[in-house]
Image: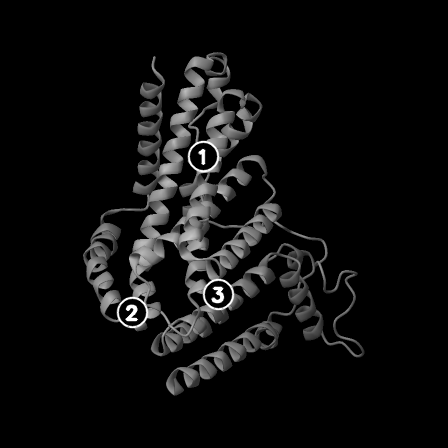
Amino acid sequence: MRASTLFRRRLTAERGYQWGVMKTVLDWTIVVYLVIPVMIAAPFLYADMWEHSGLYWSGRLPFTVLFVLILLVTAGGNFRTYLMEADLLYLLQKKELLVPFKRLGFLYSAAGSVIRVMAAGVIALPLFAGEYGLTAVEVLPLLAAVLAVKLVLMTVKKFISKGSVIFAVFVLLTAGAVVMVTNAAPGLAGVFSLFISAAVIFYHLKQMPRSDRWFMKEIEIENREKVRYIKLILTYSMEVEKEPVDQRNSPIIMFRDSKRIFKGDRSKEDGLLELVVKGFLRRNYLMLYIQMFFLTLSAVIVLPVWLKWIVFAGFVFFIQSWLKSLFQKMLESPFFAVVPYDKKLENPVWGRFRKLFAFPVIGLAGAAVVLFTIIGLIS
């Protein structure tokens, strides 16, 4: 069997598997009422971006913000080899078949990365042109820098699994790319970025024949990539219960020694509120809470005035409903089956819990909306 034949079979099987996963959520109602309307509206929306780019992006922001956004959108992915566990029995012993097979997988992944970066650049081109006056030729060096960052990051992810290290590398690469595109001449930045990309590709192709020690790591990557859509569906499925992965006995910063929050004369209401607050802080809820606030704040800063208020209204509704659902879930904990509480305390405790966690972020988000609305109207 030729390596190209085996690669085509694996690629066809992979596409068939992923399509089968997607069909589990793309029933006829989703296709008719969501997918088809989006496909029809997309060209008109893109044409409107060219005509009215100010409705979709603020030119007061530096162009590097849009550049970083493209970096974030395109940062995912891995170099694929399409290997399977069963290949340990046969393919690993056949270097004349294994090496060209892995080379095809790598080149296919690299070509896919180029296409994704170019697609992101084409989508963002109306914003670069309309808000910053950049031509397509001037945007190309930016896309070359994005591609270089993506290829280097994918290389790091092939050898390192720790998320914190990968995130730190991404931050450093992003900072370096921003410094380069803002200080170097566009042509020089583009040439240097293409040189980095070519060096990464050459490195992988050069070490391909002696990469047997990474065989299990490559299989691990393949297993993760194979279930990426399944994980995405489960993450956003409302019917699937998703427990936080990081469950701590004590929070990282606050109340590490489980000391009392309320001092002096304590009521039953104080005791129940204290248990709920500590339960909120000792799980991943606090991180999600902070992420949602900063995501909303970013949208308020970037979006046009009329969209700022829509986002803010949605945030007010969502944060309260989300906290309410978490509050109810914590009260349904098995702990309260052993240590019961007075059901009459739920409403007053919920009111105090909402004041602690909903009102502060709503107030900050509202202040940001008002501030950036005034700035937008003045300018």
Nearer-N-terminus badge (2/3): 2
> Which label sits on residue 148?
none
Classify residue 107 as left or right of residue 88: left
Measuring from the top left, give residue 231's x and y in whole percent. 45, 44
Identify residue type, mark 1. Ile
Residue underneath mark 3 = 295
Q: Position of residue 131 (x, y in %)?
A: 33, 70
| Disc 1: CA contacts within 10 A as few (<14), some (14-19) or many (>=20) | some
Evaluate whether residue 208 shows in this view. Answer: yes
Direction from residue 159 to residue 75 in the image, left or right: left
Q: Kindly report which numbered mark, 1 or 3, lies closer to the viewer in this rendering.
A: 1
Q: CA distance from mark 2 to mark 1?
A: 36 Å
Q: Nearer the viewer, residue 68 or 249?
A: 68
Residue 242 point in image, percent of width and height: 51, 50
- Determine the CA span between mark 1 and mark 3: 35 Å
Q: Is residue 112 above or below residue 336?
A: above
Task: Specify the quadrant of the image occupied by residue 101.
Answer: top left
Please give the name of the residue rendered at 35% of the width and 46% of the height, measured from the top-left corner: 116
Mark found first going from the N terminus, 2 or 1: 2
Q: Secondary structure at mark 1?
A: helix
Residue 53's mark? 2
